[in-house]
Amino acid sequence: MMKLLRKLLKKSHRRPSTEAPIKEAPNIPEGQLGTYAENVQQLKNVFKGCNDIKLRELQPGTLTNGTIFMVYVESLSKIDALEHGISFMHSLVQPPKNLRPNETTGSMEARKLPDFKSVVEWVLEGWSVYCLPNGEVYAVNTYLPPQRSIERSETEGIILGPQEAFNESIQTNLSIIRRRIKSTDLKVKAYKVGKYSQNWVAIVYMNHLAQSEYVQTLEERVQAINIDLIMDSGDLAQMIDDNPNSPFPQYHMTERPERIASHLLDGKVAVFVDGTPFVLSGPASFIEFFQTSEDYANRWAAASVIRTLRIVGVLISISLSALYVAVVTYHYQMIPTDMLISLTESRARVPFPPVLETMIMELTIELLREAGARLPAKTGQTIGIVGGIVIGQAAVSAGFASNILIISVALSTVASFITPSYIMSSALRAIRFGLIMLAGFWGLYGLFIGLLMMVLHFLRLTSMGAPYFSPFAPLRISDWKDTLIRAPLPFMKYRPTNTRPKDTDRQPFKKEATKRSIPTSATVDSEKGESE
Amino acid sequence: MVKRPFSKWGLALLCLAVLVTGCARQNILEDLGLVLAVGYDLADDGKLVLTVTMPEISREAQEKVQVITSKGDLSKEARENIAMSTDRQIVNGQLRTVVFSEKLARKGVWKTLDTILRDVNITSNVVVAITDGETRELLHTRFPDRPRIGRYLFELLRKEAKSFTVPRTNVHDFARLYYTRGADPYAPYVQLKNGAVRAAGTALFHRDRFVGSLSPEETKMLLLLQGKGQGGDIKHSFDTHNGKKEMVMLTFVRTNPKREIIVRPGKPVLVRYQVQVGGQVVEYTGDLDLTREKNKKIVEKSIEEGLSNRIIDLFEQLQHQYKSDPLGIGEAIRATGGYRPWTEEKWRDLYQNAEIEVKFDLRLVRTGMTK
């Protein structure tokens, strides 16, 4: 089957094009820097047709004493920063006389560029580039693009806890994390990904916690990406996944800084991508997608109840409609007699077999939901009314669906919203249709085959090589304190073992003696010797 | 490692899902005739008469229940005959009550119950009941306020079992007692009287043959000895010091029967029951002041005596009249280990001759509350 698919894909690739394909990104020419005139000429050639990139020749006497040629992307630069840059260049051309030894001429971040390729890169990066009369080329950081401010998270709302969310700028995002973890242990490794988009991708981790194996894996995978455009961390995640065909996300994807901060301190590795508020972290486990930072802000008893509720919600959302199909089609024995009679009464008017009935209703609900997600907020209200009245009332009275099915479909839809992670929730949404079909084919037997296959898939799935279904399989009882229940914080003395953090102690013990690592006799002796 | 998105097995399963679907037998709800109760009668020609009741679910229907009767040599054959006269697919999965007519039950019910036990669709929680008349008549009776007779019968027996006028047994209990050499099965007994269904005590069996029935009052005594009487009511009348007849209604608050089997060489087995009962007076017509300890003692003693007599009466019936052992005394004798090899003849013999001794220890824990 896959062979067939691949063949089809290949064929469509070979569609004849009128132009010869361009092998490389066109506008990064190789070459050394030459004299001033050569540089200017080459720059003018390169940026021909890019009207948003300003090419200005500053005549001597006006702003500077020599001729300076400057290139910058107008929309990415701050005007007063440009002023500073120009005066800085001016001081390079003609150093001020009253400068004391070792005194610099300003706090601008500037660097001398070695070759022409880097010139183009820095211009596109948003820095302003200056060609000096002596043939030297400098780049000055005047980067200040327009960006969204730090706002509340729309996709992952919480009630308790910090409300700020990441935004599209990687600098802002890194600054938020740096503000939360004031440690030199927080390492950031940046890479550029995307042939045309040239996104900054930062791999962030705690040096003394994260396994270097994971960091290395991520680095290798990120560097191996060869694509023209990275739109979001979501598509990046699919390129660095262990199993790209699995419906389930293998990296945690969140726009909440405190989640990422806590993940980093669990020994996980985070991936920041420029241009998206969503940050990846891994290795991820299945249960993690049902945790929120609110669970830790809330009291542990309440948080535990909510945790369990979420898991029940998952079971309901994936299997309730399928259960309805199975029971109504095959297993009438399972229902209490009184309920059976009322169920049969409502089913009696429906002309479709149960599978079809359920598929139609599920489809309708999915249509509504998708429409609600795409519509502007004001029109979204209409969808709610249409959905509630037309689908709920009219479908039943028209004999289109039984009212118990409506309840089950509505309940499973509501239950699917309980999953905090949108990406996991949509994966479970997709799974549901498969289970309904299986239940229609084979009844409960089929439903359980489907659920078992799902569990088997979980068991086989890994995230960056770490088991996805941990701590259930492989069984790690000590990690259960943060799964179906959220144990009181004093119980969480050790970090979760799934990420194999280098340092396991989360809360240091008061007494040295109770520490996990027992000192060897040699160290005890030496300590004694010192004290004496 | 190369990850294959569709493994060979996955593909095979997918194909199977499409190809084998036709093989699964669908029971789509609205096409089903759900049998809630069945009745078995014996026709004059020796054939089995089967009556089934199915709830009619469509709202337009005048009758809320469909009752069909058919004949056959075998119960499944009769079922096939019934299927011919309905548009629904007859299924057994919701069967809750099985009723036998006394006439059939006297010949033995096991052959018929066996197919019910073996049917995987039927729960083993099915109630087996015996009725004095024809089950056909019972199930064909229309109750305008209780449109579904099958359901009504089940609920009635379940409710009455809570006040111990009928035993709470199901087909599983029946089978267990049937297979035990040392106990006889028993089942609820229902009567159709003046157009009303009535729970009427216990049907007693000798092996699988119906031998007689106990009244609701006697049923309470039977269940009391099984330790199930808690919450049951009992009426007791007695003569007082001044020769007046007084009556007292008693609710058992707690019951604790103890059974002791004493094997005496050369003499019949002694079965000694010691029953501790805590009772609450709910109604009393006499004029003794029951709050006084002395008067209470008098009443307690009288009730104890009355209860003991009832139990002795009960055993008289069970041992000699019906030759049925619903209390499993035979099993208890076998458990003493003194009678090996154990045979049915030995059991019947020992049971019939066993000496029964009953000692009541009654305490009136509450003599009436005022609001």
Image: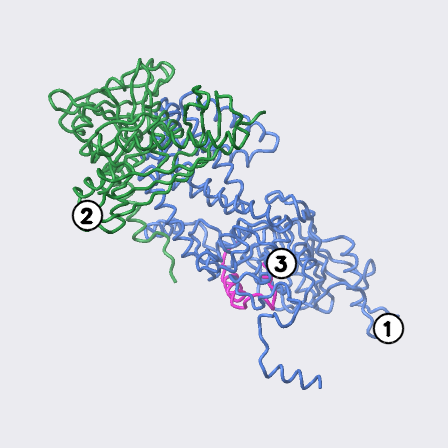
Chain colours: A blue, B green
Q: Residue at x 33, y 13 (%)?
A: B62
* In front of the other: A529 or B306: B306
Q: Residues within 10 Å of mark 3 (few under 14, many from 20)?
A: few
Dots 1 and 3 on the same chain: yes
Of mark 1 and mark 3, the one earlier in the sequence is: 1
| Residue B278 drawn above or below residue B346 | above
Residue B109 pos. (x, y %): 20, 31
Amino acid at the residue labelled 1: Arg
Q: Could you give the CA–CA distance between mark 3 and mark 2, rounded to whole angstroms?
A: 64 Å
Q: Could you give the CA–CA distance between mark 1 and mark 2, rounded to whole angstroms?
A: 120 Å
Residue B89 appears in the figure? no
Amino acid at the residue labelled 2: Trp
Residue A92 pos. (x, y %): 78, 68
- Looking at the rendered structure, the secondary structure element under dot 3 is helix
Amino acid at the residue labelled 3: Pro
Q: Nearer the viewer, mark 3 or mark 2?
A: 2
In reply to whether residue A226 is colored magenta, the answer given is yes
Q: Nearer the viewer, mark 1 or mark 3?
A: 3
| Residue A370 drawn above or below residue A47 | above
* In front of the other: B170 or A23: B170
Q: Which mark is residue A246?
A: none
Residue position marked by numbered label 3 in the rendering: A490
Residue position marked by numbered label 1 in the rendering: A100
* In front of the other: B31 or A148: B31
Q: Which mark is residue B342?
A: 2
